[in-house]
Amino acid sequence: MSSETPWDDIGSPKADFNVRKVAGTDAIPIFWGKNVQGNCLLIIELDGDHSTQFRNDVITLHGITVDLRNGEVPFKQRLILTLEKHVDRDLFFGLCKTLIASLVPVSDASVALSVVLVHIKRWKAFLAGRKLRLLSAEEIQGLFAELQFLRLLYTRRLSEIAALDAWCGIDSVHQDFIFGDTAVEIKSVSGRERNSVRISSEDQLESLSSNLFLMIYKLSDMPDSHHANSLNDIIRIIELELTDDKALETFSEKLSSFGYIPLPEYDTPRFVVSNSQCYQVSEGFPKLVRSRLPQGIARLSYEIKLESIKAYMCSDSLVLERS
C-alpha cells in the first residue's frame, strides 16, 4: 500500500496546474502539483533562459516526463517533472525528495538545472539495472570514510571546489585524494578488521607525489547513538555545508560515479568514527608496489598489521595544514 504523499490532498484542476509550494524553497522555488489529467508533478522555477542547456543535457527517464516551459512572466522558466503512471508514485516521491534536498542550498538557476539533470541520470541508470546496483557493505563503509576526509579537506586546507577536484573518486587507479604534491589513500576498518588494513592493489601505496599518506578511520556501527550517521546522513550534511554552487554540482557528479542515489537502504548502518589515524608512507613503510614486483605478478591485495606501522604515525596537520 502506498504511503502518504504531498499529492494526496491536491485536486486536479480544470486547466493548467494546481500547486502547493514546498516549504523552505525560496532561492529556487519548488512546487508539488497536479495537471488536468491528475498526474503528479514536481515544478521547479528557474530565473533566466536555460533552453540551450536543457536541450544539450536533458535525460529521458522511463515513466517520468521532464520538460522545460516558459513561465507566465518574462525571463522565468519551469522545469516540470510529470509522473506518467500512478503506480510508480512512491518511487517518484523518492526522486522528488532527493531533488528538493539537493536544491535547498542552491541559489543559481543554471546550477540548479545541472543538479536536477545529474540526479535524473543517476536514477535512470539505477532503474535500468546497469552500473547503479546497490552498494555493498564494504563500498558503503569505504565511501563513508572518504567523505569524512573530504569534509576535513574543505574545512581545514582547500577551498570547496579544490577539495572536490582533489577527490579522485571511484575511477582512480592510485590514491583517493591528490592535491599539489600530496596524495592520500583512505581506508576504513571496523569490527574484526581493527588490527589490520587491507590494501587492494599494488598501486595504492605507490605515488608520483612527493608526500604520500595513509589515513585510516575506525568505524563503529552504533545505530542508537545520537552521534552516528548513515551514508545518506553524511551526504546530506555535506550538501548543506557546501556554499559554492559549482562545488555542489561537482559533488553530485562524483557521487553519481560511485553509483550512489539516496535510497532508504543507505539509512543503515549508522557509523560513529571512533578513531582516525594518519600515517606517512615514507622510506621503509611496509608495502608492495608495482615498480618492485617480480615480472608476471599483477592484481594483488594484501593486509598490513597496524602494529607494524606505529613508527609512521603522524599528525593529520601534515596533510591538512594550509600551505
Image (cartoon, grey):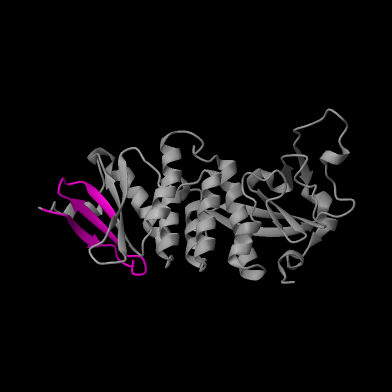
Q: Is residue 229 visible?
A: no
Residue nearer the viewer, 207 or 16? 16
Using the image, determine if residue 88 lies above or below residue 162: above
Question: In the image, is 3 to the left or to the right of 141?
Answer: left
Residue at the far left: name it. Answer: 14
Residue at the far bottom: name it. Answer: 322
Q: Is residue 306 visible?
A: yes
- Quarter of the image with the N terminus in it: top left
First to last magenta residue range: 15-42
User: Percent position (x, y) of residue 249?
Assistant: 50, 58
User: Percent position (x, y) of residue 197?
Assistant: 72, 46
Question: In the image, is 300 to the left or to the right of 123?
Answer: right
Q: Residue at x 16, y 45 (%)?
A: 37
Question: In the image, is 199 to the left or to the right of 237?
Answer: right
Image quadrant in which you'd find residue 317: bottom right
User: Percent position (x, y) of residue 280?
Assistant: 80, 57
- Quarter of the image with the C terminus in it: bottom right
Using the image, determine if residue 129 lies above or below residue 216: above
Q: Residue at x 71, y 49 (%)?
A: 175
Q: Residue at x 22, y 63 (%)?
A: 72
Residue nearer the viewer, 274 or 248? 248
Image quadrant in which you'd find residue 99: bottom left
